[in-house]
Amino acid sequence: MVVGRSFSPALPGLRVRHAVAPSTPSIHPSAMLALAGGPRMCGRLSQYRGIHDFVETLSLPEAWQNNVGDQPLGRYNVAPTTPVALLRVDEAGPRADLVRWGWRPHWATDRAAPINARVEKVAHGPFFRAIWPHRGITPIDGWYEWVDEGGPKKQPYYIRRRDGRPSLCASIGQFAGSEHDGFVIITADAQGGMVDVHDRRPVVLAPDLAREWMQPATPGEQAEQMALNLGEPAEAFEWYRVSTAIANVRNQGAELIEPLQ
């Protein structure tokens, strides 16, 4: 892994690269509830492109501090509590880091760390008050949902953008460089046909809005309105059945996102 290396955004044009998946990170016991019987909303992701591809989508002109590495991430089955690539801006400029997926305030020791935050409450409720000002973008290739179709097991679906570009998910987190760091993805009510897959969806922002979301100077009230009203519509996405092999977090590989025949 290349740590602390800066790089400039690449030339336009995404390159989808399927990589050999690395060994599966260990799963914290608090995540096991999400991994049994079908995860919570947006409880499994894919992040298989390289960080350069994700940064390229944002089209920020500044050089980035890359703490993730230059190789494709190659992760087709990303589970809660594992490190996930996240993009944000601090006083030194744009940066890419690996951050634990899931966060809870120090006083909430009686519950597992949530991985999502509801857009309707996140800006005003006490649970996420400490991290609401600390915004980032979680760039993903897609996410999975489980649907009860009457069979012995719930049927997993894979959801991705129709145009093939990464989904830029609005996120907030604690980025203090401590063992308590983590992040959550903001979710909203599903729309259109996506309701048939799940009643919630991540708030995915267009690149210009994602750049605005990341800026520390963007007022909290403005960020809230962006998350509430300006997420990408259901028409921007497609979804299809995939293999139930995705239910086992130890399974990795490009075959997990192939449509079920």
Image (cartoon, helix red, strand yellow):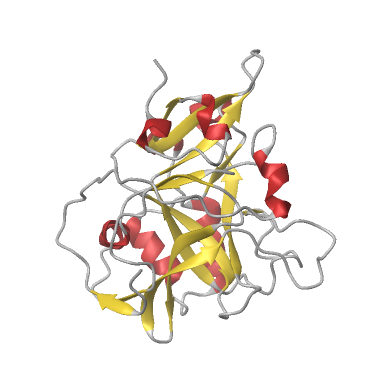
Residue 51, x across and y down, in percent: 32, 61
* x 39%, y 86%: residue: 92
Count of numbered badges drawn on the protein: 0
Closer to the camera, 259 or 195? 259
* x 30%, y 63%: residue: 55
- Give the quadrant of the N terminus: bottom left
Q: Is residue 170 left or right of residue 149?
A: left
- Give the quadrant of the C terminus: top left
**Residue 211 figure quarter:** bottom left
Q: Can residue 55 be seen in the rendering of this structure?
A: yes
Residue 34, x across and y down, in percent: 68, 43
Q: Is residue 253 left or right of residue 71?
A: right
**Residue 162 figure quarter:** top left
Residue 139, x across and y down, in percent: 41, 55
Residue 181, x across and y down, in percent: 61, 72
Q: Is residue 46 left or right of residue 123?
A: left
